[in-house]
Amino acid sequence: MGQEKTTHKGTLMTEARLKAPPSSQLIQYTHAPRLLREKRRFAQFLRVDMTHTVMLVEEGILSREDGKRILNRLRVLSSLGAENFHTEPAKGSFLLQVEDFLFDELGEDVGGRMHTGRSRIDQGATVERLYARDCLLDAADRLVDLQAAVRRLAAGNTTSIMPGYTHMQHAQPWVFGHYLHGVFHAFSEHFDRLVAAYERTNLNPLGTVGLSGTSWPLNRDRTTELLAFSGLVDNARLALEEYYAVEIMAVLSFIMSSVNDLASDFHLWSGFEFGFVETADSYCGSSSIFPQKKNPYALETIKKEAGISTTWMASALSSFRTEGSGDHAPRRVLQVDDALQVTGDMLDYLAGVVETLIVRKDRMHALASGNWSTASNLADEIVRSTGLSYRQTHHAVARMVRLAIERRIRPDDVTADLLDEAALETIGRTLDFDTGRIRLALDVEAFIRTRVTVGSPNEADIKRLLGNAGRRLARERRWIARQRRGISDAQGKLETAMDRIC
């Protein structure tokens, strides 16, 4: 006796259990927002559906004929694209929207078989990881592009002397290229954090089902291969967890913190009182009342977005509170979408600012030369010549600076008499130091040339650091390309597997 074909076209899944249809508020505040978010994952949802269906056929759980019909229908849906796929929030989540699309042509008796050995929990968790993985690679591209822009700017400023600051006061001469390498290094460390987060994200939860696995003999290794995951979520219970998403939020917050540092420095240094850099006109706006104004809109926007990022990780963790292990609803870090978008956008925005930045080298040099930032070097020279301790020479030079400021004497006008006067007042003896040696010790260019320790801002060491940075960039780009190639190869395997069935 043949099996009777049964279809329930237009029947809501919830009607089998619930007496009442979804309220207008449930649709408005739960179903519609969730569906809008899920439609952004259109490609990932279909890839999971196709992969699961292929695996079911290969394992003999689903007949080849039914698998063929389902896969062909999924291919039709894929060709429509998210923008042309009509959805109805009253029907529920994206999974149910796709099922409804299948049922229209195949009926529930065929279309409903795609859900064999699967839960909305592990399906959704798999989609989330695929989407996060793809977005992380996009963010990595933007991060590397910014690093490359910073490195290029640094390479053009290996001898651009500027004041170095502690407590926002001149400390010692610095070099703009050395500063920029430090920025590059911070972003490189964030790239490493991103890679670590990617590795914990790129694990396959498909086949863990709702909580305790399934009696169906699913081949989880096969779906791992076809989805380009690097491994499995081993414990079925852990498919529900999204701590990997919290880690992503933390990494993005790190990145945005360094974005804020660079934007804040450029913003400060572009003011008239500093005048070290100038943002290109194409990244600025003007004032409706002040004719002279050139407002750095790009830097202000970047700083504003970076400020919000400080709450990302805490907000993500707070969404888990009160749940405990008894709440088996999948945890969704909804904020991760906005965080990924904002981070990528601001990295791109800041790269544009860096690539077009105007550097005022003469202004940097003039300020570094005029405000005693080389005083520590004079103290070192006195130690070498006299055998006094650094603390003694520190006292003498500090008093000399005080006297010079009181008498309006510039560093390049200091004399041996002034230094001896200061030394007598502080350590009770003269130093008999030649005026020429004093002025050479206070010269900013001589200061930079005499920095000998590894990592110093002398030109040779900056070039060494930037050489290392170039090699680092190449490794980062290779890593991104390797991940994308693996995803593309897996997609090719999936297409081949579908072709064999269809």
Image (tube, helix red, strand yellow):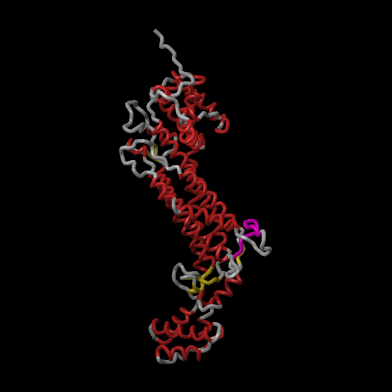
Residue in the image at 44% along x and 84% along y: 382
Q: Nearer the viewer, residue 32 or 158?
A: 32
> Residue 281 lies in magenta, yes or no?
yes
Q: How far from the left and from the top, in percent, is residue 443? A: 54, 79
Q: Position of residue 109 (x, y in %)?
A: 44, 18
Residue in the image at 47% along x and 59% along y:
185
Up-down relation of residue 403 to residue 15 (above or below): below
Q: Nearer the viewer, residue 305 or 457?
A: 305
Provide residue 131's location: percent of width, then percent of height.
47, 40
The region drawn magenta spans: 277-287
Residue 266 lies within the magenta run: no
- The quadrant in which the N terminus is found is top left
Question: Does residue 57 appear anywhere in the picture?
Answer: no
Q: Which residue is rendered at x = 47% and y = 36% of the image? A: 29
Q: Residue furthest right?
A: 291
Q: Point out residue 305 in the picture as x, y percentages from the top left corner.
A: 52, 53
- Marker count (numbered): 0
Q: Is residue 182 left or right of residue 1?
A: right
Q: Residue furthest top?
A: 1
User: Residue 164, can we see it?
Assistant: yes
**Viewed as shown, does residue 475 lie left or right of 298?**
left
